[in-house]
Image: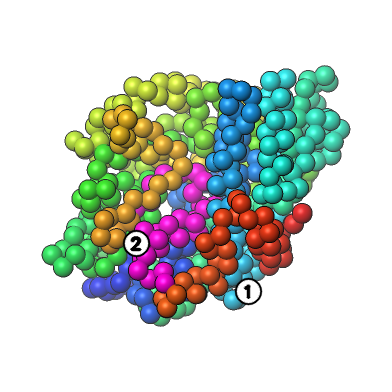
């Protein structure tokens, strides 16, 4: 990928981190204002090497079809699908952006990063079957989940996905839902495609091996971003009117260094993960689905077990996991001191409050760390009873940092998901958190526009072009059935996905 060797003195926009978030935001901004000078800074030698990498995330195309952590049971036996509907329609924003880029020719072949793959939820045991039955009843009655199927028939479920039923004991209650219009997304490949397209445009530069060390506000309200070159060891800096910190787990420390009041009190709790991976064609060809189970009690959302079809670099594989663990690193290639360096006087109380109230999570992570490989394999066999140990290898998943934030009711709360924090003068924004993350990158980019570039979103500014890129911008797909149907039909046709 082309990259300039000389860091310019000034830019309109500097983005820290060359993952899917920066790639998406930069793409959207250059489509809206081609004259913008955008510089991306990345510590590593290539883009998408942390959480955006295909092997570091689930690649579900998180449309909240199968992830049961988005649909908690209420005390009266009903299921709350509100969070699922939010994520479901946020993924539609990503699909519209991708379809626009395919039609424009910026992405020559959508199958280079996205492919059809059914999304399934699977449970066993009477209580879990009752829950899934109620979940299906509520979700299938909403237009956003048109086409969802349900079965408690082992023969039908085996037809959908043979591996999870073969060898399972007779008489055990089982149930599954399926949506055939799901997808598998390689966000690492997509990030490369977006940066390849951006690098062909004037006014865009991406610089690798640049470790950002500090971000300070200047007297003229511009930002000075200071870095050192990890190869030459030279110190460099660049000034920008707007800074986006999209550095995954590394965003917390840079947000703190920026000194903006809006970032006070925030901290992070890192969660690591391990996959089991199968690359044997005779096995992976017999499983074409993403099958999600129920999360263990007290586990973080990223630890929801799933047996995933993954297509990365034309190779079809299966992933199972992830098994959660603890590391003090905020990035997979980060430092063991990351978490300790992030502790500041303003976030000590929120972090202690979260530690006090989340013993279940701590106990769960400790149990996962202490799990032997044989215990991990037995968990796989709950989803694939005939699995053989020698067919699977261990792979380290991406590092996730859950948000610890100050709260009006308490000193601090542990938040799952993502959160965008922007300065009051709209000159800096930082993205914290984890799943659903990459799948909602386009929605998050819109959040950045609305928080930091609202003065540009006018009829004589960026708005007409934005509605060309995202045709449903300003429309609530959760309530507008026709608009939801139309956009899914159109994007499915452009991206070569299944549509029901």
User: Callout 1 environment at 10 Å: few (<14), some (14 to 19), or many (20+)?
Assistant: few
Dot 2 corresponds to which residue?
452
Residue 467 shown in magenta: no
Q: Are marks 2 and 1 in contact (CB under 8 Å)?
A: no
Instruction: Indicate the position of residue 135 as horizontal and vertical percent values.
Output: 67, 33
Q: Residue at x 71, y 24 (%)?
A: 130
Principal secondary structure, stretch drawn in magenta: helix
Identify the magenta region: 430-458
The answer to which of 493 and 213 lies nearer the viewer is 493
Q: Residue at x 82, y 19 (%)?
A: 171
Which comes sooner in the sequence, label 2 or label 1?
A: 1
Instruction: Indicate the position of residue 389 as horizontal and vertical percent values.
Output: 67, 30
Is 419 left, or right, of 381 in this rendering? left
Is 406 left, or right, of 108 in this rendering? left
Dot 1 corresponds to which residue?
103
The answer to whether residue 104 is above or below residue 493 is: below
The answer to which of 298 and 469 lies nearer the viewer is 469
Give the CA separation, mark 2 to mark 1. 28 Å
User: Callout 2 environment at 10 Å: few (<14), some (14 to 19), or many (20+)?
Assistant: some
* Callout in the foreground (2, 1): 2
């Amino acid at each position: 990928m082309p990259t300039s060797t000389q860091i310019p003195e000034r830019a309109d926009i500097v983005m820290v981190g060359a993952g899917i978030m920066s790639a998406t935001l930069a793409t959207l901004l250059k489509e809206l204002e081609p004259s913008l000078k955008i510089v991306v800074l990345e510590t590593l030698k290539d883009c998408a090497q942390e959480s955006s990498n295909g092997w570091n995330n689930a690649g579900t195309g998180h449309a909240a079809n199968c992830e049961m952590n988005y649909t908690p049971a209420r005390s009266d036996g009903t299921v709350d699908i509100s969070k699922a509907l939010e994520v479901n329609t946020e993924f539609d924003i990503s699909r519209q952006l991708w379809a626009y880029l395919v039609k424009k020719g910026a992405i020559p072949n959508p199958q280079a990063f996205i492919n059809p793959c059914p999304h399934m939820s699977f449970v066993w045991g009477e209580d879990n079957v009752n829950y899934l039955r109620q979940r299906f009843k509520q979700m299938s009655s909403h237009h956003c989940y048109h086409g969802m199927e349900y079965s408690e028939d082992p023969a039908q479920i085996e037809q959908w996905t043979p591996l999870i039923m073969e060898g399972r004991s007779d008489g055990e209650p089982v149930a599954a839902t399926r949506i055939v219009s799901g997808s598998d997304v390689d966000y690492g490949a997509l990030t490369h495609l977006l940066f390849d397209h951006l690098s062909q445009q004037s006014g865009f530069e991406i610089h690798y091996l640049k470790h950002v060390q500090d971000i300070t506000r200047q007297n003229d309200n511009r930002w000075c971003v200071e870095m050192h070159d990890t190869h030459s060891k030279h110190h460099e800096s660049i000034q920008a009117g707007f800074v986006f910190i999209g550095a995954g787990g590394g965003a917390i420390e840079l947000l703190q260094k920026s000194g903006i009041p809006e970032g006070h009190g925030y901290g992070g709790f890192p969660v690591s993960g391990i996959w089991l991976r199968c690359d044997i064609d005779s096995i992976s060809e017999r499983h074409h689905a993403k099958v999600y189970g129920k999360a263990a009690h007290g586990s973080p959302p990223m630890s929801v077990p799933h047996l995933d079809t993954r297509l990365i670099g034309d190779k079809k594989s299966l992933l199972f996991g992830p098994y959660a663990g603890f590391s003090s690193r905020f990035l997979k290639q980060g430092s063991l001191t990351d978490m300790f360096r992030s502790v500041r006087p303003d976030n000590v109380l929120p972090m202690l409050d979260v530690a006090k109230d989340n013993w279940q999570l701590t106990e769960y992570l400790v149990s996962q760390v202490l799990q032997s490989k044989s215990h991990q394999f037995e968990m796989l066999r709950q989803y694939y009873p005939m699995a053989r140990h020698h067919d699977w290898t261990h792979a380290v998943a991406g590092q996730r940092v859950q948000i610890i934030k100050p709260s009006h009711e308490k000193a601090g709360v542990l938040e799952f998901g993502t959160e965008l924090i922007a300065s009051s003068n709209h000159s800096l924004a930082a993205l914290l958190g984890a799943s659903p993350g990459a799948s909602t990158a386009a929605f998050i980019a819109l959040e950045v526009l609305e928080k930091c570039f609202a003065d540009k979103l006018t009829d004589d500014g960026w708005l007409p072009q934005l509605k060309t890129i995202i045709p449903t911008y300003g429309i609530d797909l959760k309530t507008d059935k026709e608009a939801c149907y139309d956009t899914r039909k159109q994007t499915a046709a452009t991206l070569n996905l299944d549509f029901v």
